[in-house]
Image (tube, rainbow, N blue to C red):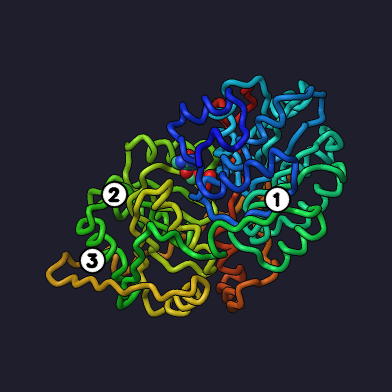
């Protein structure tokens, strides 16, 4: 099947060709014709399957006809994180370059003034995180009654982050006869309930079994004797496995920071991205990674979720994620767009329970990869006993930012035990993965502000 068979306009086909694509991915082949027919849609698809274009492309053609009105966006795309929202906005810019459509991005960490001005001028597409959208809605700066098309992207992640009540509120403000598209990598019961309540006679598409991992990714688990030797094993793998570009995931922000510094000391071109960095620093670091200034990016889950970086050859799980779904998302950073990739998970005794939960979820045993350190370098003295880093006190965030924090009381959906509370009284998730807001001080890149398509 070719893109030309899907019913898209010639302008859009030209934009797709300019991106270098001629064959639609399975999700695009199945979703695009239904969306163009204005049907509701539930799509079970992981990131890396081309799911973004499966809604962005038909939306552009649908929105090509119609008139913008002040304060009343014509369509709304909800994304769980600012990075994902910015990425969808980039897709709109690329595919919509032959159309006269206006887009606004409503995300935390960016001054509200420009966003409000854009809304007042009228937008065709509003891409938002639920917290900032609710905030502007409550301030009366936005009306959702003209919004005929709603996309809920990464719904399972929205659930993880505690956004479902906000999404229910937002859904109830939109016209009832709107078109709704819901994308999720998995379909836990609360998402099913949301879909039953707010979608009408949806077409159901599943391009991969929920929580299965991409077959282009060779997965390995690497037993390590203790957390103390993880850095040594990692350095060995980075050198031995011809790593071109790698994302290294850690469960704690502190570990991300310390690991990046340690790798730099050992001569690796490593950077870091985690929820304690402000938005401009995160984007700058991501750009350094995309442009090749660094080839190793140490990340936390919240900061890295869904990021689409071309040609990541390796993913390393320095820690096995506590939530098995995160494993699928982490390793999905490699093997994108049909490329092959490798994913290594370091498993110390304290990761054992987590890796078993991952294998339970994906339904497959991950092959063991043994690293024989042999004569490998001894750990640095400083690394044998890492100093207990003190997490900076969290500044109190503005209301809309606080709303972007994951909630701790979300229902458990994978049958795993809830994370043990840390001695400081916070859950591990709260302490390490909360996506702390930053205040945007720098210039707004075109895709982060408001742009005409
Ligand atoms: P997504 O699942 O939307 O995050 O997309 C994953 C990657 O696949 C992105 O880098 C897209 O640019 C790329 N992509 C999307 N559609 C196609 C296509 N039809 N052919 C090849 N690559 C694609």
| Residue drawn at the location 54% of the way across and 28% of the way down | 13
Label 1 sits on residue: 41
Q: Hey, which quadrant is residue 96 in on the image? A: top right
Q: Counting residues from the N terminus, which is met first, the one under dot 3 or under dot 2?
A: 2
Label 3 sits on residue: 379
Label 2 sits on residue: 264
**Considering the numbered disc 1 on the image, is that residue within a helix, a strand or a loop?**
strand
102 lies above or below 155? above
328 lies above or below 6? below
Place of residue 150 in the rendered image (x, y in percent of width and height, measured from the top left): 74, 43
Place of residue 363 in the rendered image (x, y in percent of width and height, measured from the top left): 48, 74
Pointers 2 and 1 in contact (CB under 8 A)? no
Q: Hey, which quadrant is residue 106 in on the image? A: top right
Q: CA distance from mark 3 to mark 2?
A: 14 Å
**Considering the numbered disc 3 on the image, is that residue within a helix, a strand or a loop?**
loop
Q: Hey, which quadrant is residue 107 in on the image? A: top right
Q: CA distance from mark 1 to mark 3?
A: 52 Å
229 lies above or below 71? below
- Of 330 and 34, which appears nearest the observer? 34
**Considering the numbered disc 2 on the image, is that residue within a helix, a strand or a loop?**
helix
- Of 393 and 40, which appears nearest the observer? 40
Q: Counting residues from the N terminus, which is met first, the one under dot 1 or under dot 3?
A: 1
Tell which tag, 1 or 3, sits nearer the viewer.
1
- Is residue 276 left or right of 196 when viewed as pictured? left
């Amino acid at each position: 099947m070719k893109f030309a068979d899907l019913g898209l306009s010639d302008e859009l086909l030209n934009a797709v060709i300019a991106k270098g694509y001629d064959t639609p991915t399975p999700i695009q082949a199945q979703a695009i014709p239904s969306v163009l027919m204005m049907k509701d849609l539930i799509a079970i698809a992981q990131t890396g399957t081309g799911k973004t274009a499966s809604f962005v492309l038909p939306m552009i053609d649908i929105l090509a006809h119609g008139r913008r009105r002040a304060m009343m966006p014509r369509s709304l795309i909800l994304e769980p994180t600012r990075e994902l929202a910015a990425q969808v906005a980039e897709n709109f810019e690329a595919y919509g370059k032959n159309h006269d459509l206006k887009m606004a991005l409503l995300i935390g960490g960016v001054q509200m003034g420009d966003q409000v001005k854009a809304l007042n001028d009228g937008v065709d597409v509003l891409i938002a995180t639920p917290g900032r959208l609710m905030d502007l809605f409550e301030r009366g700066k936005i009306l959702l009654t003209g919004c005929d098309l709603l996309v809920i992207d990464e719904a399972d992640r929205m659930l993880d982050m505690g956004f479902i009540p906000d999404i229910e509120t937002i859904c109830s403000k939109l016209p009832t006869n709107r078109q709704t598209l819901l994308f999720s990598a998995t379909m836990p019961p609360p998402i099913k309930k949301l879909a039953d309540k707010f979608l009408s006679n949806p077409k159901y598409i599943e391009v991969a079994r929920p929580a299965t991992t991409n077959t282009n990714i060779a997965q390995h688990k690497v037993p390590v004797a203790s957390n103390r030797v993880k850095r040594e094993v990692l350095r060995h793998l980075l050198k031995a496995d011809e790593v071109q570009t790698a994302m290294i995931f850690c469960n704690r922000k502190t570990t991300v920071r310390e690991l990046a510094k340690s790798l730099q000391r050992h001569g690796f071109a490593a950077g870091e991205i985690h929820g304690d960095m402000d938005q401009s620093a995160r984007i700058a670091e991501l750009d350094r990674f995309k442009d090749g200034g660094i080839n190793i990016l140490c990340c936390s889950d919240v900061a890295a979720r869904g990021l689409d970086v071309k040609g990541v050859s390796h993913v390393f799980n320095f820690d096995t994620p506590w939530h098995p779904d995160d494993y699928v998302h982490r390793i999905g950073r490699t093997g994108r767009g049909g490329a092959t990739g490798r994913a290594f998970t370091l498993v110390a005794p304290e990761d054992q329970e987590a890796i078993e939960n991952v294998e339970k979820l994906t339904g497959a045993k991950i092959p063991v990869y043994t690293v024989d350190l042999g004569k490998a370098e001894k750990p640095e003295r400083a690394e044998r006993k890492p100093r207990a880093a003190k997490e900076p006190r969290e500044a109190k965030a503005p209301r809309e930012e606080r709303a972007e924090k994951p909630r701790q009381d979300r229902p458990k959906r994978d049958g795993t035990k809830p994370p043990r509370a840390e001695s400081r009284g916070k859950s591990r998730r709260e302490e390490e993965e909360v996506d702390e807001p930053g205040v945007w001080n720098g210039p707004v890149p075109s895709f982060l502000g408001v742009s005409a398509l």
